Image (cartoon, helix red, strand yellow):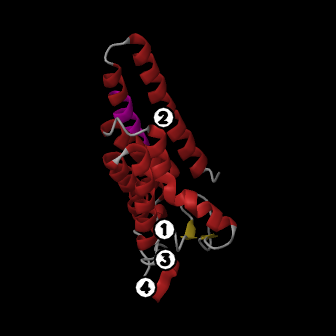
Amino acid sequence: MVAGHFGFGAIVKSRERSTPLWALMLACQWLDVVFVPLFAFGIERIVPVPGTSGGYGDVIIYADYTHSLVGALLLSVLFGVVAAFAWGRRPAIVLGAVAFSHWIIDLAMHRRDMPWLPGNWLDLPRLGFGMWRLHAVSIAAEAALVVVGWWMYWKAAVQTADRNPPLVRTANLAGATVLIAGLVTLVLNVLGY
């Protein structure tokens, strides 16, 4: 769901023009950024669903710290607090909320592999609605987030350029970059890269 998270970040950027795009893109992937070193050290893991290739959506992700409900809330608050030092209160709240949006989007996509508490403490039933089981539906949902994010971002960028030809060209280039990057990311993700 990497591309879908980026699409959501672009949607937010269209409304929150003073928040840097790069910060929104980092925020929407923040849980996965923290996941990577934990995965590298074997603390969190990815296991193919039995009987599948382990490709797009065919995995169970045991991200028991970064993608637990409480862990995601804590990481999102941390991201927002750090952002407050750089950009102030409103962007910090927006960035913290975007960081937590990762968990909400993953809740729709993941199989029941997301714990309530860090480390799956108390062994409570895991969460996840499992849209990944329906490959065509999950790919369509992710593509929709990318396309809607691109369209809203591009529209806001052109409006901000306000008929200044060099800025309109830059806005068009930025919009095209967001769309192409999102779609290429989605295709690579679906192909298993």
Asked which secondary structure carries label 4, the reply is: loop
Residue on which disc 3 sits: 118
Q: Residue at x 41, y 57 (%)?
A: 81
- Cβ atoms at labels 3 and 1 below 8 Å apart: no
User: x, y percentage for residue 116?
Assistant: 42, 77
Q: Residue at x 56, y 61 (%)?
A: 34
Asked which secondary structure carries label 3, the reply is: helix
Amino acid type of the residue tagged 1 in the rendering? His
Asked which secondary structure carries label 2, the reply is: helix
Q: Nearest the camera: 63 or 92?
A: 92
Residue on which disc 4 sits: 124
- Cβ atoms at labels 4 and 2 below 8 Å apart: no
Q: Residue at x 64, y 66 (%)?
A: 39
Quote the CA–CA distance across marks 3 and 4. 11 Å
Amino acid type of the residue tagged 3 in the rendering? Pro
Q: Nearest the camera: 181 or 14?
A: 14
Task: Reply above or below: 152 against 88.
Answer: above
Of labels 3 and 2, earlier in sequence is: 3
Residue on which disc 1 sits: 67
Of labels 3 and 4, earlier in sequence is: 3
Task: Reply above or below: 182 against 58.
Answer: above
Residue on which disc 2 sits: 178
- Cβ atoms at labels 3 and 4 below 8 Å apart: no
User: In the image, 1: left or right of 53?
Assistant: left
Q: Residue at x 37, y 27 (%)?
A: 157
Of labels 3 and 1, earlier in sequence is: 1
